[in-house]
Image (spheres, rainbow, N blue to C red):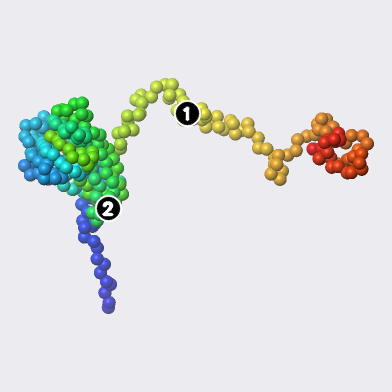
Amino acid sequence: MSRLPRRSVPAFPLLVALLSSRAPGEVATPIVWDFESAKLTWRPREDTIALTRTEGVGATEQSKACLRVQGKIAGGWNYAISDTHPLAAEQLYRLSAWVRIDKLGETSAMPFLKCEFVPADGKGELGRVSTETYDGSRLGQWQLLAAEFKAPAGTVRCWVALEKGARTPMEIDAYLDEVQIEEIDELSVFDKYRLKPTPPSLENVRGVHPRLYLDAARVAALQRRSRPLTRRCGRRSAPKPTARRRAAHRPIAGMTAGVATSSSGSVVSGTHCHRWRWRTC
């Protein structure tokens, strides 16, 4: 008896699927870089940037340490980048981080954070999402930068970076703390434009077209009042003849219908003759 050939299963995609699968209703553990451990998983983009774990200057009362990013950089898009972590495709997330900028070069742009999406094969680009930039009017203060997003299809992993904003030479002295990526159920941006409570004047016109003021009842009433036109050969049906229309089609006495004869004896069509009092349709 012959055996069926074995089919090889890619190990890495299968492992990712097993690790990312979870029971319904189970909340995924957030990805957190709190820099409480002495082991740093972030690295500088260039050797001219120094990353050091600094104690006693955390962003929150519970924080015992944070990451200091200091130095000059000649090129590239970011100062420092994190290690990679699994991320579920088409899931909603919130990226947040506490940032404190103590010093920037004269030509340096205000930094921000970004999350870069990585496909299964690690090749190509799936895109990225960025937080708002640091408020330069409040240098030396901790600011919470955040962004909400939906991971694109094909996303398997991600990494985070402290961005420069341009590829020109820059200088920075900054601190990072409580960098986090967590799952969310919905985007909070919609709550910014949702009225709570809805004013009575707006509640009364709920479901009404904002410009035409048409609702379902009004549309039905207009449909009942309208009458379809009877069409014949693609044209509207001819109107009923009136006394004026009948007079316009009646030839003048002494003329033959449809044709008139000029003094020279030539026959002139009624539709083209302008010298004879002849009316046509």
Q: Is residue 84 left or right of residue 213?
A: left
Residue at (31, 49) in percent of width and height: 153
Whole-percent x, y for residue 142 in the image: 16, 29
Q: Count neighbours of disc 2 (C-alpha within 10 A) and say few if under 14, some if 14 to 19, many if 20 or more.
A: few
Q: Are marks 1 and 2 in contact (CB under 8 Å)?
A: no
Horizontal side of residue 90 vs 39, given as left or right: right
Front-lying residue, 215 or 136: 136
Q: Which mark is residue 29?
A: none
Q: Does the rendering let one see residue 23?
A: no
Q: Quadrant of the N terminus?
A: bottom left
Residue 147, picture quadrant: top left
Tell me the kind of residue under disc 1.
Pro
Q: Residue at x 42, y 21 (%)?
A: 200
Identify the mark at residue 210; answer none if there is no mark. 1
Residue at 20% over, 44% down: 76
| Residue at the disc numbered 2 | 124
Q: Which quarter of the figure has residue 54? A: top left
Mark 1 vs mark 2: give the one in front: 2
Question: Residue 267: x, y in percent?
Answer: 88, 44
Type of residue at label 2? Gly
